[in-house]
Amino acid sequence: MTVATVPSVSYSITVRLEVPAGGKAVSQLTHAVESAGGVVTALDVTTAGHETLRIDVTCATRDTDHAQAIVDKLEAVEGVVIHKVSDRTFLMHLGGKIEMKSKVPLRNRDELSMAYTPGVARVSMAIARNPEDARRLTIKRNTVAVVTDGSAVLGLGNIGPAAALPVMEGKAALFKRFADIDAWPICLDTQDVDEIVRTVQIIAPGFGGINLEDISAPRCFEVERRLRDLLDIPVFHDDQHGTAICVLAALTNALRVVGKEIGEVRIALAGAGAAGTAVLRLLLAAGARNVIVCDYLGAVHRGRQDLDDSLRWIAEHTNADGYAGDLRGAVKGADVFIGVSAPGILNGDDIATMAKDAVVFALANPEPEVSPDAAREHAAVVATGRSDYPNQINNVLAFPGVFRGLLDAQASVVSQEMLLAAARALAAVVTDEELGPNYIIPSVFHADVSTAVAAAVRESAGGRARTGMTEA
């Protein structure tokens, strides 16, 4: 299964070139790009002379090979001299994407003496006498650590902490953009559970929350569990709980579209890792009763001999009839398919075997479990993790608002009730008038998303801030 790709800004390039001032080359530049399948987004004359023009041609491409093919086409235009080709994504990342700035002026000696020594000593002693004042008098009240070991980065796998840093920077930028939270990447050069837990434990005093990110299963479960027991600040694993919130919110609205209830539908879930397990737990907490989970070996059931603790929990809480077949068999007759697994594991014929008015969430990125176009031929509602199809399920819909609510409430943990509240609030952003097969989840830029989720989490945390995560 191949998902057709189109030119994307994430692969956009700017080509600086020189052309004769009086020839036909200028008019041929756009044609050259388009004939190669690219899209010109800007054409700027940067230097003009009597003999030559220097021009920056910016265009969207499909991938790096396509970008090179476009450059070759431009170079083939008579009179064109290529000077430089810049990848705009790499340019955005030069020097990193985030920075630290002082919130207070330091223009003279008086201001310096209050912000730093000797004035700061009084503040430090106040915190020493009453540690709770750290939330009021320091950055702790609005700061989150984004922690990774680089073992499961996006769809790239175990690429290590240094290669994970651009992703964690991006996560920090999203925290700031969507919830005005100061987040900082913490990329650990270890994949040992004990070392990860101890490191996060000893840096925790400087943060109001911990966002675990891109740590592979099953280690991520133990890391999260142990840190929740050790720390007095909330620990949130976005790959698990952020995904679960967004999936439940989208499913809530998808079932509204097709007129079905979560407690009555049959759900086939592909993926038993961090995301799949968290999605399952939240679905069960929301009232789902008939779920079959499949991994690469097929359905998870009580009779399987390879069950670790996580798979054993899944087997004990799902698949009551003991189905032991493969994913295709689990999908047959199901009302809902949710994929958080691998690309191309189903096709349109498989979706055709689902129940009437089926819901399909194919969330593997960048290539979904089933082609969205093929799924749409048979399913009533289709969602993906991609930005080039309707109904994009993206974790940025959840984690900024969740942490905004947690920090505002000075919560010490994340509870199952908070996750459910966040999912309900996110679903409710889509009004009855807006709801439809192609709009079951709001845009990440919807002004109400972060505030609605934050308010729901803040209310849920009130009076229960020290209640731990409940089991589904």
Image: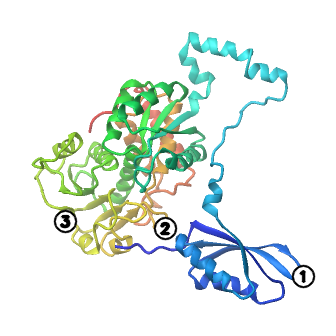
Instruction: State the CA–CA distance, disc 1 to disc 3.
Output: 71 Å
| Residue at 53% over, 35% down | 144
Q: Which mark is residue 333?
A: 3
Query: Which one is nearer the viewer's eye here, 410 or 130?
Result: 130
- Residue 400 appears at what percent x and percent y? 52, 43
Report whether 15 appears left or right of 302: right
- Name the image quarter holding the N terminus: bottom left
Which residue type does callout 1 highlight?
His
Residue 275 position (above or below residue 90) = above
Residue pushed farthest top? 129
Give how far apart the Cα atoms at labels 3 and 2 are.
29 Å
Q: Earlier in the sequence, mark 1 or mark 3?
A: 1
470 to the left or right of 31: left
Point 71% across, 33% down: residue: 103
Q: Which residue is mark 1?
A: 50
Q: Nearer the viewer, residue 217 or 174?
A: 217
Query: Label 3 sits on what residue type?
Result: Gly
Residue 56 in the image: x percent, y percent? 73, 72
The quadrant holding residue 219 is top left
Label 2 belongs to which residue? 388
Q: Earlier in the sequence, mark 3 or mark 2?
A: 3
Residue 288 x/y as whole percent:
25, 49
